[in-house]
Amino acid sequence: MLLSLRIQNFTLIDELELEFGAGLNVLTGETGAGKSIILDAIDLVLGGKPSLRMIRTGTEKATIEGTFTVNDRIREWSIEREFDLSDDDTVICSRELSIQGTNLRSRMRVNGAICNRQLAQELRELLIEITAQGQTVQLTNPTHQKELLDLYGGGKIFQQQENIGRAYTAYQQAYRIWIDRQQNEQQRLQRLDLLQYQAEELSQAHLTTPEEILDLETERQRLSHVVDLQQQSYAIYQLLYQNDTGGSIAVADMLGKAESTLIDMVEIDSSLQSTLDLVSLALAQVTEAGREINYYGDALEADPDRLLEIEERIRTLKLICRKYGPSLTEAIEFEHSVQTELAQLTGAVVSLEELERQSQDLYAKLIDACQQLTTLRQQAALDLERHLIGELKPLAMDKVKFQVEIATQTPTATGADTIIFNFSPNPGEPLQPLAATASGGEMSRFLLALKACFSNNGGAGTLIFDEIDAGVSGKVAQSIASKLHHLSQSQQVLCVTHQPLIAAMADRHFRVAKETISAEHTGNGTSVVERTIVRIEELHSQQQRRDEIAQIAGGQSAQEAISFATSLLSQAKTRKKAVKQSRK
């Protein structure tokens, strides 16, 4: 429920603070007095589209703040969105518009926290619902009519729609895979041939490690110089360990003599022990090196066949690298990717026939789910027909006929139904689509009755009606007034009206009027200019309300209009008392 609204520098309002209450809140005033400005402000504070013209001329910033009470649905929403509510169980929504150069800046807050437009829109659906006669165009749209029927049907329909959404997605995916396979089968087969050729060539190459080429080149280098290596290793052996040429003494022999001499010296001077240890270690290492180089030289032998084999293998690997490399590492990785793609194209490949069968099976499941939804909609349609006719009859439409037509269409994510609201307001007239039969006044009553049908469906806490009574008078206006009051017993209702019959039923009555004031203007010099502002005043006393109703009824506070207004207020008091007693 909307508790209060504070406005500053918004269009023709300089500063205003209003407090609303439960029941029927009515705004009246002459045509063009600015009644719809209040509704524009409420719309804006809950995510409506801003514009520069909304900032009052001569100012650079406009602010609007609305305070709402919290209900269970808002508490659940706040928990889902991890949004903190205030301690006093209220939601304070604010909107600030400011001019920066030639641009408009807008900022929304909820309980002081910055709020994006999506969040504000979600909250708006829980707080208010604005209804204007202009919405009748939307009401004639079959898509909107389907949404209304589903909303009326409630939980079971929404749950089945989720089932259909999943079934539709599964069918679309399967159908697309089948169609894509048909369209891409030739490309798939061509790709398969190429991959099989590449896989065969790489398989025959027997790729092992990325270092194979380097290892082979090292071995080739050794085999190409085997004679030189044998000669050089033998020469090193003689220098280090055993010299058979009778020339210079081998290093091992010289170190042996040095070791023997040092042993004798250590017996005399033990401080030479460390030197002896070094020489002994050197002798051992030289001896080991001599033996290893000897073994190396003995193991070397020429192998022309192996050399040819290595040359051929290197050429093969380098060819593979040129085609799939540039290095052997990349060629090995490419072979792995070829095998993977081959497995995807050949391993567990589903045939075209199987894909078609899967698509048809999922389509059958979709049709079955749609049929279940159609059954639920048919039941909801019968309930809505009875309910809506019951709400229309008190609105001076005793002979009205209403029917929800459900026709079959191609399945979509929302089912396989086309919904059309058929309407006959007068006896003898056949049922026809709503857009082709209802007049402006009839459409207003239809829209009001429809809102009444949804009043107990856990909708918004505040219903706002903008001149829903346009185009009606007399008995019809009285029936609309009664219906608005009836709605206000379960939800707060805020109504902009020109009808004295509706104004008389108000629990809170606000008068809207334009006023011209003088204001100083500072430019090249100070001057006094006239400005138009909108004033809104709550009418507390019976006399204030009587005079306002007389004004909108007769155009002036003449005695006849005063008497008429007094009578309306008296009748309204009686009707409201009767309603309260009937609800006990």
Image (cartoon, rainbow, N blue to C red):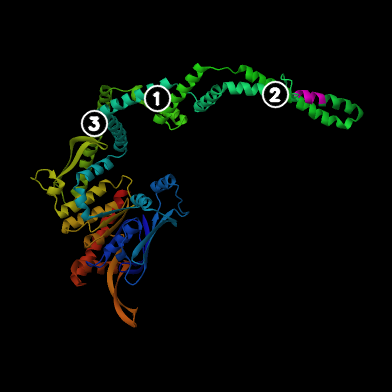
Res 48 quadrant in image? bottom left
| Kind of residue at badge 2 | Ala
Determine whether 477 is above or below 156 in the image. below
Tell which circle, 2 or 1, labels the residue nearer the N-terminal end: 2
Tell me which residue sits at (15%, 47%) in the image.
434
The mark tally for this picture is 3
Q: Tell me the quarter of the picture where residue 342 sits.
A: top left
Q: Position of residue 571 (x, y in %)?
A: 23, 60
Point out the stretch of residues depicted in magenta. Answer: 252-257
Separation of marks 2 and 3 at Cα, in angstroms: 92 Å
Q: Earlier in the sequence, mark 2 or mark 3?
A: 2
| Residue 289 numbered tag | 2
Query: In the image, which is nearer the foreground, mark 2 or mark 1?
Result: 2
Q: Is 71 inside the magenta-drawn segment?
A: no
Q: Dot 2: few (<14), some (14–19), or many (≥20) neighbours within 10 Å? A: some
Q: Nearer the viewer, residue 413 or 469?
A: 413
Q: Is residue 254 magenta?
A: yes
- Kindly give the residue lying farthest to the right in the view shown: 268
Q: State the image coordinates of residue 191 (x, y, percent, origin top left).
A: 31, 27
Quarter occupied by the N terminus: bottom left
Position of 381 with respect to 488 (left or right) is left
Most foreground residue, 354 or 458 = 354
Question: What residue did someone put label 1 on?
Answer: 339
- Nearest the camera: 414 or 26? 414
Instruction: Report the amino acid beneath label 3.
Output: Gln
Tag nearer the camera, 3 or 1: 1
Give the mark, 3 or 1, whose residue is nearer the N terminus: 1
| Label 3 crowd bin: few (<14), some (14–19), many (20+), radius 10 Å | some
